[in-house]
Amino acid sequence: VKGIFDKYDVDGSQTIDMDELLVLLDDLGLLAKLKTTPKEFAAEMFVKYDANNDGVLRYIAPPRFSSVFFGWPAQRAPC
């Protein structure tokens, strides 16, 4: 997932801005059948996922499965 994020972070800012998000969504084919304009659709995503309302999206690494669900160290889950 981080590799995809980095691919679309073309300016290397460690964030995805509106223009970068539109390219990502278009490449995924998500803009083809919208009921709104692409900018309106992307703006809705920013409202939903821009935690600090600064106009960019940041990558936040997902927690490791074992530590989240079991409280075990991520190296090895017990049998």
Image: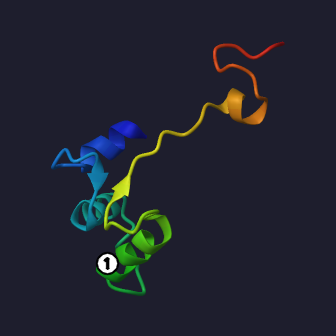
Is residue 61 found left or right of 21 in the rendered image?
right
Q: Is residue 63 above or below residue 45?
A: above
Residue type at mark 1 is Pro
| 20 relative to 31, above or below | above
Q: Secondary structure at mark 1?
A: helix
Indicate whether 21 appears above or below 5. Answer: below
Front one among 21 and 26: 21
Rendering quarter of residue 16:
bottom left
Name the side, left or right, on which 29 lies relative to 61.
left
Residue that appears at 19% across and 44% down:
12
The residue furthest left is 11
Q: Quadrant of the N terminus?
A: top left
Q: Which residue is mark 1?
A: 38
Give the colour scheme shown. rainbow
> Which residue is found at the position 35% from the left and 72% from the top?
31
The total number of labels drawn is: 1
Q: Nearer the viewer, residue 1 or 69?
A: 69
State the image coordinates of residue 22 (x, y, percent, origin top left).
28, 66
